[in-house]
Image: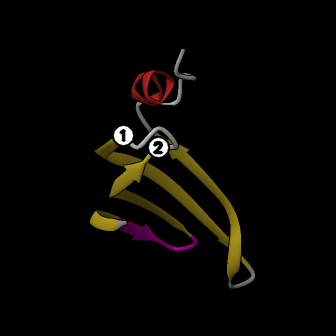
Amino acid sequence: MRAKTMIVEGNNACVIGNYDYVFPGGAKVNGDVAEIWKSKDGKLGSLRIFFDTDAFKVLTKPQS
């Protein structure tokens, strides 16, 4: 994962990250992901990740 953009304000952060994925069938794809981080008491309290689910649906479909 490579962070492309990061905005941090207090206990909150938004990161646009770039990932290289390798799927069980051998397909490889590169994609950006938006992540919302929230910390609590100096630890990760929550993490929400947003990505293109359509690409994952196609690439993780069982081969027939």
The residue sitting at 41% across, 50% down in the picture is: 22
Quarter of the image that includes the C terminus: top right
The residue lying at 30 percent from left, 68 percent from top is 2
Q: Residue furthest bottom?
A: 42
Circle number at residue 23:
2
In this view, the residue farthest toward the top is 64
Query: SS at mark 1?
Result: loop
Is residue 53 covered in magenta? no
Which residue is identified by label 1?
27
In the image, the segment drawn in magenta is 7-11
Label annotation for residue 13: none
Left or right, 40 with respect to 58, comes to right
Give, as a three-letter code, the residue at label 1: Ala
Q: Is residue 36 above or below residue 28?
A: below
Residue 59 x/y as whole percent: 44, 29
Q: CA distance from mark 1 to mark 2?
A: 5 Å
Q: Nearer the viewer, residue 55 or 10?
A: 55
* Tag 1 near tag 2, CB within 8 Å: yes
What type is the residue that disc 2 sits on? Phe
